[in-house]
Image (cartoon, rainbow, N blue to C red):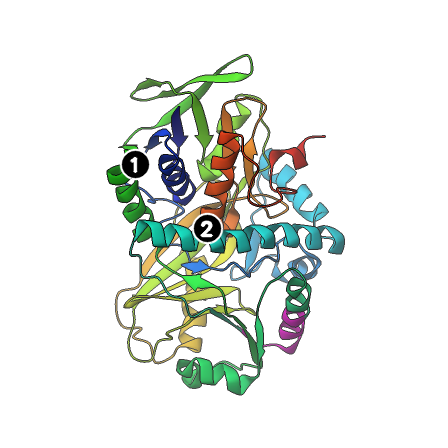
Amino acid sequence: MKVLILGSGLLGVTTAYELGKRGFDVTVIDRNEESARETSYANGGQLSYSHAEPWASPAVLSKLPKWIGRYDAPLQFKLRADWQMIKWGLRFFGNCTTKKASMNCVNMLRLGLYSRKKMQEMREESGVQFDFGSKGILHIYSKDEDFAHAKTQLEFQAKFGCVQKILTKDEVYALEPALKHSERVIVGGIHAVEDETGDPFLFCNALAEVATKRYGVKFMYGVTIEEINVKGKRVVSVTTDKGDMVADGYVMAMGSYSAAMLRDINISVPIYPMKGYSITINANEHCPNISMTDGTHKIVYSRLGDRIRIAGTAEFAGYSQALNEKRIEPIIRAAKKLLPKADWNQEIKRWACLRPSTPDGPPIMGNTPYSNLFLNTGHGTLGWTQAAGSAAIVADAMEGKIPGILLQGLTLERYVK
């Protein structure tokens, strides 16, 4: 069976690998010159399987009034005449109830824990190297109210098999001595002991190479996807700037650009780009060796070999990928306070990306109204975390197999009324 995968980011590459391993004849197309050049290029680097609390929650909703108009707010909506964003926003607010946030959390946690298992298998089978780290993720808090909320969330997730450990302030410093130099107040922490880290760009390109050499997967770069062509209940071809491409099955893995492409064939998916930013610096002896999440400022820190990746913010401002220095500056300012002895005189590499976000949080995977079109998109800030599990789920769907986990709340069906 010939399969054409649209997009060569984390979801496209992992799906290509998984399908190639199962004997499919796979081709991946992407407009860039190599894999993972957009959203997957320089994200926070965290494989945060334990992070399952959706953005759409009562906790975030209560803070939104304080964030309105602040350029340094963790979540920022830029009001614009964009009907897609307005519809997405209304759905987002509709999901900010305790009942819905809990349900979405359980669905994302189930996928996250499954992805941890599938990522371990993928690492061991492929042998790829990508600055992998397995020390867990240390969540730190500067405010008692944030720490209290995190402990409540921990207790809830523990019911579903999520292993995390509550730490005192002194235990935080013992786990990561670099924080002893911090200018920030730290009231306590949580150690997500089963979480991991790694460079998604290195991973994607290493895995693409293995998929090509071992399973014959073909990657076609510099190919711009223009249109999906359908007849009846099947996709018959994809039009590109290099001509039409034909396959037996198709996988949509175009991230934030999935929604517009799918609308043209009458599939409505509530995916909208959430812009995020990251910086990368070379590490010195005063930088952390464990990945960290600043639970108060919503900023993540990942040790990737001899580098530190620092990422954060969520901005809804359309499809522009332009760097907004006003959004990067608060990340740098917060990082300098947390890690004052890091080398801040060096060049700071800046990056912005568009995360394909759904209003409820979980991604959209699996079948569509077209019998040979499958989705693997809408993973928001957790594409790196959920990629391996999502690839296995989509491959199972294409083979007509029962998936490895319950798919409730993870498919297109939840939006069909």
Residue that lies at the very extreme toward the top in this rendered image:
231
Image disc number at residue 226: none
Picture coordinates of residue 6 (x, y %)? 40, 31
Can you see residue 141? no
The quarter of the picture where the N terminus appears is top left
Residue at the image position 37 percent from the left and 74 percent from the top: 289
Residue at the image position 48 percent from the left and 56 percent from the top: 116
Residue density around tag 1, few if under 14, some if 14–19, many if 20 or more, within 10 Å? many
Residue position marked by numbered label 1 in the rendering: 215
Q: Nearer the viewer, residue 11 or 76?
A: 11
Quadrant in the picture for residue 197 = bottom left
Residue type marked 2: Lys
Q: Which residues are magenta?
A: 140-151
Which secondary structure, mark 2?
helix
Residue at the image position 59 percent from the left and 39 percent from the top: 85
Q: Nearer the viewer, residue 179 or 2?
A: 2
The quarter of the picture where the C terminus appears is top right
Can you see residue 215? yes
Residue at the image position 37 percent from the left and 30 percent from the top: 24
Indicate yes or no whether the magenta region holds residue 305: no
**Magenta span: helix, strand or loop, mainly?**
helix
In the image, is residue 271 above or below residue 248? Answer: below
Residue that lies at the very extreme toward the left in this rendered image:
213
In the image, is residue 277 above or below residue 30? Answer: below
The first of marks 2 and 1 along the sequence is: 2
Picture coordinates of residue 204 (x, y %)? 33, 47
In the image, is residue 337 above or below residue 78? Answer: below
Picture coordinates of residue 91 (x, y %)? 68, 42
Q: Are marks 2 and 1 in contact (CB under 8 Å)?
A: no
Residue position marked by numbered label 2 in the rendering: 118
